[in-house]
Amino acid sequence: MTLLTQTPPSAVRRRGLLVYLVLAYAGMWAAMAPLLADGYQRADAREEVGTLEQLCIGAAMLAPALAALLVVRVVERGGGVRESLALCWPRPRARAVRACLLPLGVLGGLTAVTLALGALVGSYPFAGFGSLDAGRVGSWAVQGLIGMMLSLPLFFGEEIGWQGFLFPRLLKVGGGSGGPGGGTAALVRAYLLTGTAFALWHLPTLLMGGQYPGRPWYVSVPALTVSCVLVLPVFTWLRLRSGSVVPAVLAHAFTSSMSVSMVREFADPNADLDPLTMSLAGWPGWIVLGGFVAFLAFTGRLRPGRYGRG
């Protein structure tokens, strides 16, 4: 399978990348403008967002997909939207269900290891093994999965842009062949640039304490950049091995919803929660994600060419 069924000329790809980034970033800032103007600040990790916040976040999450669709249609003008953005069911179809369950298992496992590491070193206030009661865990899992599934259209909005559009084009622009043993520098550059662009796109929410409540921007911006650079290869691996953005969407949805709720669910209810010291977006998560990404890289699973062509 190829990353791009129809490959536009280099000049068109570069112009498309610029237009995409401008539109995606402009969409994020425009969507967050009401909250920024109102001086909204999230000061507590347990704080639930209100209706206006949810509407603004939802609009922002659709911006990357809209930008990608516009570029494919107006700037590139080559190939269909589904082929150009990997908007297809995971392949091979006989293993599609497994391809869609894998992201939940992988990100769930990585989150559990992160919380265990945090509890071991004392940075995560684990509520004790009583919090692992089967009924309580089951109720949390069912409610979380329902909520995650309802929010999937919004996560499609992000991953159509980052995994469907940006990563493969950065790889092509950088000269990456995607073949085994070739284009290592271009591949690494594509991962780093996509992860950094993904992180900096969140700047308006970081300024409002969205991902790291109570932390100043000069802490939260670098922290999220590290987090995105480390988690992006996991999303990309799931996208490459299936030939579809769907598993990446599921992985992103789990990371931004159920992984975050796991931190709250199994913590001491009276303890302060700091994502920077106890989640996938904090230093325990960086260690766990870094180890997993190193495994994927060492075994060649991050190379597009590993998964064949056709």
Image (cartoon, rainbow, N blue to C red):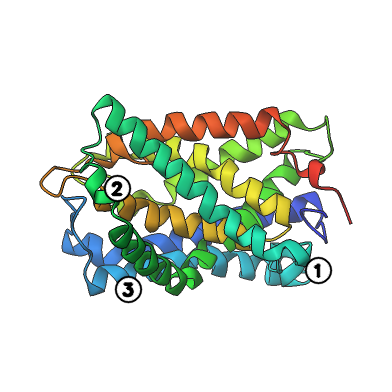
Asked if residue 22 shows in the view, the reply is yes
Q: Secondary structure at mark 3?
A: helix
Residue at image location 51% in from the left, 30% down from the top: 290
Instruction: Estimate the spatial distance between the alpha carbons at disc 2 and disc 3, rounded to whole Å.
Output: 24 Å
Amino acid beneath label 1: Gly
**Which residue is more in the foreground, 216 or 108?**
108
- Which residue position holds label 1? 79
Q: Position of residue 48 (x, y in %)?
A: 21, 62
Amino acid beneath label 2: Val
Residue at image location 32% in from the left, 73% down from the top: 55
- Which residue position holds label 2? 263
Instruction: Estimate the spatial distance between the alpha carbons at disc 3 and disc 1, rounded to whole Å.
Output: 33 Å
Residue at image location 14% in from the left, 42% down from the top: 272
Q: Position of residue 9 (x, y in %)?
A: 82, 54
Q: Is residue 265 left or right of residue 150?
A: left
Q: Secondary structure at mark 1?
A: loop
- Which residue position holds label 3? 55
Height in image: 138 above or below 293? below
Instruction: Estimate the spatial distance between the alpha carbons at disc 2 and disc 1, rounded to whole Å.
Output: 43 Å
First in sequence, mark 2 or 3: give its number.
Answer: 3
Q: Secondary structure at mark 2?
A: helix
* Residue depth check, mark 2 versus mark 1: number of the one nearer the observer: 2
Q: Is residue 50 left or right of residue 3?
A: left
* Residue depth check, mark 3 versus mark 1: number of the one nearer the observer: 3
Height in image: 21 above or below 66? above
Amino acid beneath label 3: Leu
